[in-house]
Image (tube, rainbow, N blue to C red):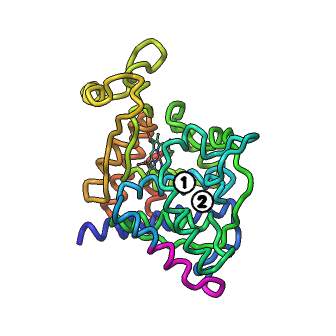
């Protein structure tokens, strides 16, 4: 019961936050956009996603991340899916996207849709719907996904680097600015960071904080020393590109895991962990999105 309340509350946050993400690039999205042109579209996407995630549940997290990475570069236009050519390196090959996985789910859904209704459903909508359906399949929250996105034809690796918030350089001010540049508020930043409730991080995403924080072989002084020792045990070398940490699912323990994961991945300041502490309050209390804003405002003032 408590668990389902938690998921319901979180889903309400996600519904609104992810919807806001789309306002920047696509006016006129609506629920059931394909109702007449391809009535089975959402069913086909859901079924394809279910087929994959039931066999490989760890794909849900990178698919959610793919949606975020798509939306932050040129809006939610599917540009993350385009391949590089001999004259252009595409977003897909930019460093932050090299750990994305799950393209085969998008391809399979697109292939099934092309059979049912050729040329109707955009890849951008498929990415958005697959992300939602994949999270749902691992018992995560549901959020409504308005559709009608148009596919982009431009995909430039350097734009992924400049638009996606990077794990190495961020402080809270930069993170807030990055989200603001997409029309997203601090509340959206906090709520969307809930995406880190699931998934993994590679040691390379944070080993600089364990082994070489300022370039002098030092550790990040803002981190707990015991936690650093623990992480060093698991990420044994600065150049460890293969080891991964975290494997979270939607559970009641999620807020605690989320704080650990998110503060490790990008928070270098107290303000960041305060925000995450706040998130951990918002979720279990089952607060609505607007109440979350009040708390965020209070925290930042
Ligand atoms: C606020 C700025 C953000 C930063 C700096 C950030 C950074 C990162 C980093 C460094 C990783 C680990 C990548 C790896 O080592 O493989 C990661 C993973 C992940 N991120 Fe974020 N992220 C942010 C926001 C988001 C948002 C808004 C979402 C979705 C709502 C999201 C969803 C995920 C997921 C699901 C994973 C796990 C992926 C997997 O298991 O393969 N992130 N993020």
**Residue 287 visible in the current orientation:** no
| Residue depth check, mark 2 versus mark 1: number of the one nearer the observer | 1
Q: Is mark 2 within 8 Å of ligand 1?
A: no
Q: Quadrant of residue 147?
A: bottom right
Residue that appears at 57% across and 50% down: 69
Q: Residues within 10 Å of mark 2 (few under 14, many from 20)?
A: many
Question: For the residue labelled by badge 2, is the local secondary structure a helix, a strand or a loop?
Answer: helix
Question: For the residue labelled by badge 1, is the local secondary structure a helix, a strand or a loop?
Answer: helix
- The residue that disc 1 covers is 68
Q: Is mark 1 within 8 Å of ligand 1?
A: yes
In depth, the one of 20 and 297 nearer the eye is 20
| Vertical side of 164 occupied by 104: above or below | below
Q: CA distance from mark 2 to mark 1?
A: 9 Å
Disc number at residue 21?
Answer: 2
Query: Residue 195: x, y in percent?
Result: 43, 54
Among the two numbered marks 2 and 1 on one chain, the one whose residue lies closer to the N terminus: 2
Residue that appears at 31% across and 62% down: 285
| Vertical side of 103 occupied by 16: above or below | below
Query: Residue 283: x, y in percent?
Result: 35, 59
Query: Residue 296: x, y in percent?
Result: 46, 52
In depth, the one of 157 and 178 nearer the eye is 157
Q: From which residue to which does the magenta span run? A: 35-47
Query: Residue 284: x, y in percent?
Result: 30, 60
Residue that appears at 62% across and 63% down: 124
| Vertical side of 228 occupied by 14: above or below | below
Give the left or right position of residue 196, taking residue 5 as reference.
Answer: right
Which residue occupies the extreme bottom position in the image? 36
């Amino acid at each position: 019961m408590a668990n389902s309340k938690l998921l319901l509350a979180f889903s309400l946050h996600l519904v609104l936050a992810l919807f806001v993400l789309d306002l920047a690039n696509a006016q006129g999205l609506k629920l059931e956009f394909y109702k007449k042109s391809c009535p089975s579209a959402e069913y086909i996407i859901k079924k394809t996603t279910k087929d994959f995630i039931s066999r490989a549940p760890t794909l849900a997290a990178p698919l959610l991340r793919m949606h975020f990475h798509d939306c932050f570069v040129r809006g939610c236009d599917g540009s993350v899916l385009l391949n590089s050519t001999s004259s252009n390196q595409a977003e897909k090959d930019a460093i932050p996207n090299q750990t994305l996985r799950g393209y085969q789910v998008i391809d399979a859904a697109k292939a099934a849709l092309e059979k049912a209704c050729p040329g109707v459903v955009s890849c951008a909508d498929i990415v958005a719907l697959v992300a939602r359906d994949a999270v749902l399949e691992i018992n995560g929250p549901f959020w409504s996904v308005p559709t009608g996105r148009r596919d982009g034809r431009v995909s430039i690796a350097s734009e992924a680097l400049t638009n996606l918030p990077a794990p190495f350089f961020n402080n809270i001010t930069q993170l807030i600015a990055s989200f603001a540049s997409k029309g997203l508020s601090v509340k959206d930043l906090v709520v969307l960071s809930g995406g880190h409730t699931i998934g993994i991080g590679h040691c390379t995403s944070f080993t600089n904080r364990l082994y070489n924080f300022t370039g002098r072989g030092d550790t990040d002084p803002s981190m707990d020393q015991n936690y650093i020792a623990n992480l060093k045990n698991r990420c044994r070398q600065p150049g460890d590109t293969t080891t991964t940490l975290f494997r979270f699912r939607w559970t009641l323990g999620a807020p605690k895991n989320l704080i650990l994961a998110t503060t490790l991945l990008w928070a270098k300041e107290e303000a960041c962990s305060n925000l995450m502490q706040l998130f951990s309050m918002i979720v279990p209390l089952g607060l609505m999105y607007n109440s979350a804003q009040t708390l965020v405002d209070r925290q930042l003032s």
